[in-house]
Image: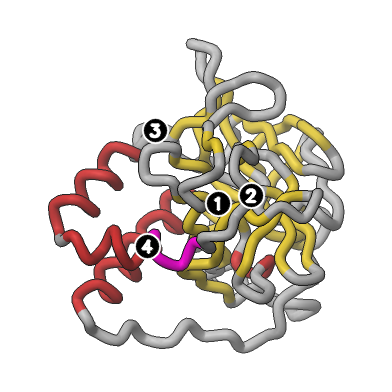
């Protein structure tokens, strides 16, 4: 998926890359490490960084984590800035399982930070288009509060899924990667933690989020105005 993303961006037009990367703050702290599973802060929101693409220098977290546009690590060091987001996450509302949930934010990373795609436990986090969210798939979730917990996907809905059998989450885990452990010792991302649906932790599908991000980048670079993201509910606390 990472290579396909790269080919799409570079093949479409140079302004797409400029659009994606230009918002990164020039005064970000040099040498600060950026990796999936790290704590990120935006305004008063504390969340977990999800997927990180070292080649494109783009990172993802939950869309409801957005704050003032600037993104920092737990020590207040600036690492980048918000480029794009979608968020229609319900807060305390009854959600039909057919409702599409979109909750992601793309972050343009500063050229001064040191980027990698290694989870805190040492596994490389990759995007593999052959591994997608399906009921029963063994997965693990990493959040800055709960660490790594593992279980299975309980059910898959419209752009999101729920987890059970050991996966837990708390405030601050939003945006954290949900991944399948591969036989070669790596981790393939299948989603990013969103909130809870009843008793089950829920995540947005990486396949859906990355597709929406590509559509929004192409739309912005072409000069067209993308349809506004519906936000019928206020965003939950990260």
Task: Select label 4 or label 1 by which is in front.
Answer: 4
Identify the residue at horizontal 37%, vertical 45% (top origin). 56
Task: Select label 3 or label 4 by which is in front.
Answer: 4
Q: Quadrant of the N terminus?
A: top left
How far is the residue under mark 1 from the one under mark 3?
Answer: 18 Å
Task: Select label 1 or label 2 by which is in front.
Answer: 2
Per the image, the residue denoted by label 3 is 128
Could you tell me if the residues under marks 3 and 4 are in contact, i.e. CB atoms within 8 Å? no
N-terminal-most mark, 1 or 2: 2
N-terminal-most mark, 3 or 4: 4
Per the image, the residue denoted by label 2 is 29
N-terminal-most mark, 1 or 3: 3
Magenta stretch: helix, strand or loop mostly: loop
For the question of whether residue 13 can be seen, the reply is: yes
Find out whether residue 22 is within the magenta segment: yes
Identify the residue at horizontal 47%, vertical 82% (top origin). 229
How many residues crowd mark 2 within 10 Å: few (<14), some (14–19), many (20+)? Answer: some
| Magenta-highlighted residues | 20-24
**Badge 1 element:** strand
**How many numbered marks are there?**
4
Per the image, the residue denoted by label 4 is 20
């Amino acid at each position: 998926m990472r290579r396909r993303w790269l080919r799409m961006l570079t093949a479409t037009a140079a302004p797409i890359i400029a659009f994606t990367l230009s918002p990164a703050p020039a005064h970000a702290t040099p040498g600060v490490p950026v990796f999936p599973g790290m704590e990120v802060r935006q305004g008063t929101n504390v969340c977990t960084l999800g997927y990180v693409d070292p080649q494109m220098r783009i990172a993802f977290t939950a869309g409801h984590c957005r704050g003032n546009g600037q993104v920092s690590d737990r020590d207040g060091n600036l690492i980048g800035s918000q480029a794009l987001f979608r968020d229609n996450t319900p807060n305390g509302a009854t959600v039909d399982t057919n409702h599409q949930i979109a909750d992601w934010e793309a972050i343009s990373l500063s050229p001064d930070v040191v980027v990698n795609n290694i989870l805190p436990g040492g596994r490389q986090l990759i995007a593999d288009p052959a591994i997608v969210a399906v009921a029963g798939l063994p997965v693990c979730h990493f959040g800055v509060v709960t660490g790594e917990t593992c279980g299975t996907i309980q059910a898959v809905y419209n752009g999101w899924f729920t987890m059970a059998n050991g996966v837990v989450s708390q405030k601050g885990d939003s945006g954290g990667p949900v991944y399948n452990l591969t036989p070669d010792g790596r981790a393939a991302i299948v989603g990013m933690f969103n909130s809870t649906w009843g008793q089950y932790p829920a995540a947005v599908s990486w396949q859906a989020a990355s597709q929406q991000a590509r559509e929004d980048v192409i739309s912005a670079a072409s000069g067209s105005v993308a349809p506004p993201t519906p936000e019928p509910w206020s965003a939950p606390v990260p």
